[in-house]
Image: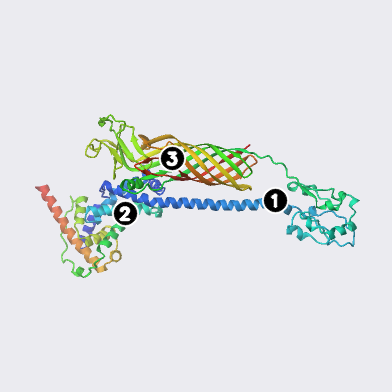
Amino acid sequence: MPEIRNIIKGCLAGSRRDQELLYRRHAAKLYAVCLQYSGNDDEARDILQEGFIKIFENLICYKFEGSFEGWMHRIVVNTALEKFRNKHNLYRVDDIDLIPEPDSAPESEDYAGLEAVDLLDIIRELPPKYRMVFNLFAIEGYSHKEISEMINISEGTSKSNLSRARVILQKKVNLYTGLKKKVVIG
Amino acid sequence: MANERANIDLLFRNGLKDYEVLPPVEVWNNILPVIRRKQRPVLLLRSAALLAVLLSLSFLAYQWSRQLSQSVQDPLIAVADQYIQPQINISPGIRTAKQPSVSKQKGNLIDGNTSDEQPVADLSDGENIRSSDIDIIPEIMDPTAGNNLSVPLSIQMIRGFSYNTDIANTGYESLNKYDFDEPKEKINRWSVTAMASPTFYLRPDIGTGEISDQINSSEQTRLSYTGGVGFAYKLSRKFSVQSGLYYATVGNEVSGINSFAGFREYDYTKGDHNFEVLTSSGRIYTDNADVFLRDNSGDRVQTMYTNDVFDPAKANLSYINNTLFQNFSYLEMPVIFRYKLVDKSIDFNLIGGLSYNLLVNNSVHTVIDGSRYNVGKTEGMNPLMVSSSLGMGMEYNLSDKFSLNLEPTFKYYLNPFGEFKGLKSQPYSFGVFSGLSYKF
């Protein structure tokens, strides 16, 4: 199997074979990220497509320092962010986020039996803003300050969105695990 | 509560880590044409940059060769003063200012050394010796006194310059006599040159329309090579004509065509080919009954085994590749004229002419695990192509017989590689030929 360095060099030289090889090697993983950031499959496809075009266009900027997968992942996440901003920049709704956080924490459950596909389904059911904040904070590890700048909301809104996202996710997770248990017992 | 938050975060972070979902096939098919289109200007820019570098190098080499040749033409610079001073017997008390000065050149270096104490005669220009000068000479020198005005042999031999040492014996009027006996140089009229070049083929888009767009976005020419032997005959010092025999390969990649192996057992037709693929060069006809072709995103494949008739996935055919490679080989017979612009240690020639290209090989293959898998050949190719060439040749003479050549050459094909449905593409190419010449 060719080394990634050779594949990148081939892509830079315009080798169609290496371009396809690069795509085939990483598309599945990046498509999962796209699905995680999008509400529907069409949107995920668009993100992947635009993301890969950017990857090929900017390949010359990759200096073989750090993880190449991480570099591609960032490009795809940024593409998703860009799409999100374009779609949601018409309204900046901070006031709705002044609702206090829920008093009680969701119940802890045994999550065994929840598969990645279930988690993906759950996360995609979130409203776009909650999904974006949750992904950026919980999965990517960005701070609320960074998120507020990324998607043009206040830090308070970011915190509030995260909190809401967690509540919704917790409920859905409980529901899923409950259903699964029932199915197993039944 | 914080733990609960961390739990749900961790659940999703760990659960989705390394999760993979295969994207739909059409995503790649949509990406490819975009990155192809964007790569073309880059290729053009690279070619332009290469051309600029070559021109700059040519200019620098020209300047350098000029300087070099000037220093060779003016060897007196390297000769000590005492060798260029005539040994003239001058009577004391006679004014020497009017005496003729001997100097090969108007060069300041020599004139600078001219003083009353070191009289020199200027042989470069007869007018420098005025009648008044001649009038005074009898007073200072007896013409019959012998060879007083002597010039060392080393000076006389420089560049064939023959100084008349009998000057004192034959009279002062012959002071201005000097002969340029250019040695009769034998001109090597014939030369044989072995040259090779990587060649970049480009072709303009073949028009507009759905099928043209599909072809334009999916095809890319490959780096090709040309090599062979040429003979040149020098018609005059500056003008020569050249011909020879060269072998040139041309390659074209057609992407977006999925090929599968194992179709033979499903092939019940008796036709000579099962699939046709439209390309800018002509139609690819399959001659391998085992191959199955399908266009990923367009209508370039024409076959009776359409989607509704045959599904390669259900038939469990083995996927090979999604790119076809067209290969053409030509025997090239050029008739090239050269005009020597600069005749120095590095010669510069303007090159122009026509080449006749005879198609000798035509095949199409795809690649499976690094090995070629024959698909067929391209029909409708012009068997004889005519191309026009224009270039700049640089020739560095290693010796009287051998020289190194570098020739950036632009070629434009006067007729298309192939033509179908009114779509024709006339490619052009750029190559930098390099090689060795032998003159005889």
Residue A39, image x, y percentages: 21, 56
The residue lying at 89 percent from left, 52 percent from top is B143
- The amino acid at mark 3 is Val
- The amino acid at mark 2 is Gly
Which image quarter holds the C terminus of chain B?
top right
Identify the mark at residue A51; answer none if there is no mark.
Answer: 2
Residue behind mark 3? B250
For this rendering, which residue is in front, A160 or B369? B369
The span from disc 3 to disc 2 (Cα, nearest Å) is 34 Å
- The amino acid at mark 1 is Gln
Marks 1 and 2 share the same chain: no
CB-based contact (under 8 Å), mark 3 and mark 1:
no
Neighbor class of circle 2 (other Cα within 10 Å; few <14, some 14-19, many 20+) is many
Residue A161, image x, y percentages: 22, 64
Element marked by disc 2 = helix
For this rendering, which residue is in front, A38 or A138? A38
The residue lying at 26 percent from left, 68 percent from top is A154
Residue B276, image x, y percentages: 31, 37
Identify the mark at residue B73; answer none if there is no mark.
Answer: 1
| Nearest to viewer (mark 3 / mark 2) | 3
Element marked by disc 1 = helix
The image quarter in which residue B194 lies? top right
Marks 3 and 2 share the same chain: no
The answer to whether residue A9 is left or right of residue B10 is right
| Residue B91 position (above or below residue B43) | below
CB-based contact (under 8 Å), mark 1 and mark 2:
no
Identify the mark at residue A178; answer none if there is no mark.
Answer: none
